[in-house]
Amino acid sequence: MRTSEYVKQQQPVNMAGVGFRRWAQALSKGKGSGISALLSGCRAASGMSKDSLPGPYPKTPEERAAAAKKYNMRVEDYEPYPDNGEGFGDYPKLPERSQQERDPWYQWDHPDLRRNWGEPMHWDFDMYIRNRVDTSPSPVPWSTMCKQLFGFIGFMLFMFYVGEKFPAYQPVAPKQYPFNDLYLEKGGDPEKQAEEVKHYEI
Amino acid sequence: MVAGGLWSVRLVGVMGAHLVRKYATETDTEPDPAKKFEFDPQFGFAERKEREMIATQEQMNLAQLPLEQRDYCAHYLLKLMKCKRDNWPNFLACKHERHDWDYCEHQDYVMRMKEYERERRLQLRKKRIEAQAQAA
């Protein structure tokens, strides 16, 4: 940290002014040219340093140990993705289990994500959050559930088909309407002579 | 006693017996309401009285009755509608008119049942005659 500004203990300081002055000094001393000189001035210490980012596939046991340490894992647990050109590098291959499967009663640091601080994140973590893909086992075997659902749907479709083939009706003749079965009311041509329909009492 | 026994056999499947007849026992004679009935309306009657339509087409048009309600009981329905219009908001007022319309509709339904039964019996008769002609 540059200590070119000596600040007395209780004196208030305009941090914007401090920042601006340091940026101007960095510009004057900076090695880069153009835009990179303007932007590369100061970075906060809380960002990712280069050695904490994922790297290439580990080939030697020492590289594996270093990678495991980087990801906060035990060397025995650490298993990288196979090196087949898919670009995973040394990122650990964690079990394909959704967050929903984790213990709901344990006091996680992030209860909604069911994850503790510093825990290695799955490659597809954003997919396995509780709002999204869930790998929890079904309460009843999948095949049983499929059989029951499709069995029911198939049965209903079959019964509807049977109902179409053999409809249920009341043992009554069709309803009788006056004026030649409402010829004009149903939109019949007034010029043409309607077919004579007579109804009788019984 | 024997006659009573016979009647009880007939009454098995009190509702839906026509469906049993249509699809199982008498598939060729049981009438289908979806199809036109084949026997002449005057057959078997000395004289049949025509059904009388009392409400006119103009009256039904003015009342804007839906097509399904433009039947032989429409005059009772028009009376009921007038009664309701005149007595609103007393929705309990038109019991007599409603009953008249309901009774007319009931009689209409009973006539439909009789027409169905007539067609069924004529079909059975036709089948019997054909069977006799074949046997002879």
Image (spheres, rainbow, N blue to C red):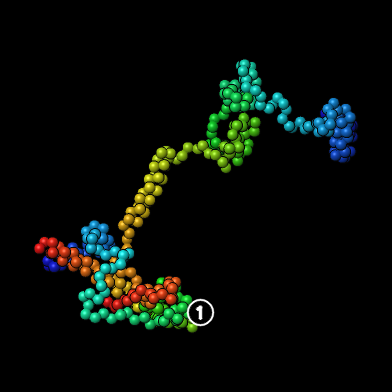
Q: Residue at x 43, y 79 (%)?
A: B57
Q: Is residue A130 above or below residue B53?
A: above
Q: Nearer the viewer, residue A164 or A62?
A: A164
Residue beneath disc 1: B89
Q: Is residue B26 above or below residue A147?
A: below
Image quarter hosting the N terminus of chain B: bottom left
Q: Is residue A35 above or below residue B4?
A: above
Quadrant of the rendered image containing residue B98: bottom left
Q: Is residue A55 visible?
A: yes
Mark 1 is on which residue type?
Pro
Quick check: A87 left or right of A163? right
Q: Nearer the viewer, residue B101 or A194?
A: A194
Element type at marker 1? loop
Quick check: B19 left or right of A73? left
**Residue A129 locus on image (x, y percent):** 58, 39
Q: Nearer the viewer, residue A139 or B88?
A: B88
Q: Chain of mark 1?
A: B
Quadrant of the rendered image containing residue A1: top right
Q: Residue at x 85, y 39 (%)?
A: A16
Quadrant of the rendered image containing residue B132: bottom left
